[in-house]
Image (tube, coloured by chain):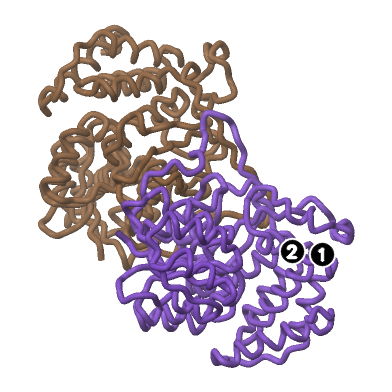
Chain colours: A brown, B purple
Amino acid sequence: MKNIFLLGASGSIGKQVIDILKMYPEKYNLKAVSVGENIDYLKQILREFNVEFASVKNKEDLLELEKEFPHINFGYGDDGLIQVATYSNENGVVINAVVGMVGLIPTIEAIKKRRDILLANKETLVVGGTIITKLVKEYQVNLIPIDSEHSAIFQALNGENKNNIKRIILTSSGGSFRDLTREELKNVTLQDALQHPNWNMGAKITIDSATMANKGLEVIEAHFLFGVNYDQIETVLHPESIVHSMVEFVDHSTIMQASFPDMRIPIAYALSYPDRYPTNISRPMDFSKSFNLTFKPMDFNRYPLLKLAYQVGKVGGIMPVVYNASNEVANELFRKGKISFLAIEDIVFDAVNNTSNILNPTLEEILAIDKQVRQKIYQKYEVI
Amino acid sequence: MKNIFLLGASGSIGKQVIDILKMYPEKYNLKAVSVGENIDYLKQILREFNVEFASVKNKEDLLELEKEFPHINFGYGDDGLIQVATYSNENGVVINAVVGMVGLIPTIEAIKKRRDILLANKETLVVGGTIITKLVKEYQVNLIPIDSEHSAIFQALNGENKNNIKRIILTSSGGSFRDLTREELKNVTLQDALQHPNWNMGAKITIDSATMANKGLEVIEAHFLFGVNYDQIETVLHPESIVHSMVEFVDHSTIMQASFPDMRIPIAYALSYPDRYPTNISRPMDFSKSFNLTFKPMDFNRYPLLKLAYQVGKVGGIMPVVYNASNEVANELFRKGKISFLAIEDIVFDAVNNTSNILNPTLEEILAIDKQVRQKIYQKYEVI
């Protein structure tokens, strides 16, 4: 039995993690779990699993939960997340499936407990990449990616020497608006943006896919996860979302990982790694029918936030934090109907262009700049 | 320095092995080598490498060679092949790049010397699979495939547990006549058959690709190499020959290996395994241009020799020997202009249908049946 400490159980990834845990009750033991405000979903989890500790976003929700589940301990807020990640002294893995950079500190604390991290929260690496990769080495834990692209690369690197990587090729569906020109993007709505052609994902990441900020974050994440330079990371359009990414080695041999687009496949792999368990998830690929896999060059003029991600990644220091914080807020403002789709790009470019870099930032500096960038945007749009 | 003992240096694969050895003079040391009748090419090799032992097909060629290269020892014929494979007591790997089942005995002897085998000669496994896989286990050597499909599977299995294989998917370009109907196959010529759409290979294998006997032999080879049932081996048409084969695992994740079609890539990989060496072989894949990878279901009615290969593979015993021997002779007769293209199929079906099976054949029985099948066909066509 592998003990599981799950951050973000009620999000899109978290719910799919729960699906997998249900499929293999003899393999996994969910010991601690966090949700945000979805108390009903937490209750379902607490009824189905032998959870010992649970945390929620708001203190107000505790009374009701403690009454209904008197044998379970509860926490709340940022501290609650840390408590979930570090709960008990038994071995186990932490699944970081929260959205946004709130996942950073709990991940750091879990690494210090020598727990492997199954990472769906790319912001953790984008803002804290230098700190996290140093800690991962120091505490000798595994950092196993859950998102489909990095899981594909991780699988392609199985049994391989990382020094033999020539380049990593991240695939991208192109997002909800891949068939629109930039001119046509001016009047798109939130409803349009939420229609991803291939994947069923959360709202934040679906919008990030449409702006290609998601691929930008993935480029930075790949840099830290696999120790490759930005010049070794390519992005390519692949409308079918079957090949989830590739690694080309120094001998010009390329390894691709493929499946139907279903996040439960990389989630199940991260959980079973280095083994693989039989599953009924999704369909296997179907070779009884003809099909095409299409690859098209990435258009950086069409997706300026992707181009910018390479630039902030190469510059390093505090700039990826600025990119991520401004994107998180802009994404939120768009989802709340406060700004237009193209204003997301304007906000991120504005933040990056108007923040001075700090090289080798401390954790405190990262948190401070993150807060400062967010407040400035909120103030400008008079949200707070 | 890795010592190399190379069987079949003047064939298509052998010459490409020589190319690779020249690229990495600091990595590989060619100690012993065999050719057939291409004495001029052998002389080139002997001038460029510090070969200690060389073998040729015919004794008549020895005098001239011994005169020009008095410091080198020479052998000839079937014994010469064994001498090359077992030369010296130093460590090293044997590359079996001969064509046809003449590669079987030298491979057995090399395994008994605990040498890893780099296998381009699929007939060795098709006819001697049971014997070879048993010896490989007993002497704890590696059997590393060189042909592109099995190299792809071997690479996809890097770091994986073979028990987690759900199925192996062998890709096939469809061969020279993939756009012709069976009716149109009646009048095709040898010249037509030798025009493979993607690969630059030897004549025997190019004809085998057109009849799909090559894929049939590969199915049987995959069964022995990777320990999978025939029901777990699929074949799919992939006209571009970019994805060289795939492994689907029990978790519905599929790993594909891809590159431009260039045999030197799998050859270089087999030599450097488990490492990979930087190379200028071929081009890397080009993502700056749009491209498609096409997959189509295999048509077993179009390619009856592939269907037959599954059948003889499942039946086992001596039947793969009969399939291989009759196909080798039929292929040769077609290349010599003695029979039509479609007569290749007739000869193989006739041999398989008119030979009684022997389960668990000994090496002697394998050699006897192989000889008997060949003689019967030669007699019928009055070639000898």
Residues B146 and B315: in front is B146
Q: Which residue is mark 1?
A: B341
Q: Amino acid at mark 1?
A: Phe
Q: Residue A69: image x %, image y %?
A: 21, 53
Decide: is A294 above or below B254.
above
Decide: is A78 above or below B249.
above
Secondary structure of the residue carrying tag 1 is helix
**Marks 1, 2: nearer the viewer:** 1
Q: Amino acid at mark 2?
A: Thr
Residue plotted at (78% across, 62% down): B302
- Is B381 placed left or right of A41 in the picture? right
- Is B280 placed left or right of B204 in the picture? left
* Residue B143 appears anywhere in the view: no
Secondary structure of the residue carrying tag 2 is helix
Residues A107 and B144: in front is B144
Residue plotted at (42% across, 32% down): A234
Q: Chain of mark 1?
A: B
The numbered mark, 1 or 2, whose residue comes first in the sequence reads: 2
Quarter holding residue B3: bottom left
Q: Which residue is mark 2?
A: B211
Q: Residue B195: image x %, image y %?
A: 73, 51
Q: Chain of mark 2?
A: B
* Residue A19 appears anywhere in the view: yes
Q: Residue A319: image x %, image y %?
A: 24, 20
User: Which quarter shows the N terminus of chain A?
Assistant: bottom left
Residue plotted at (25% across, 13% down): A384
Q: Residue B289: image x %, image y %?
A: 56, 29
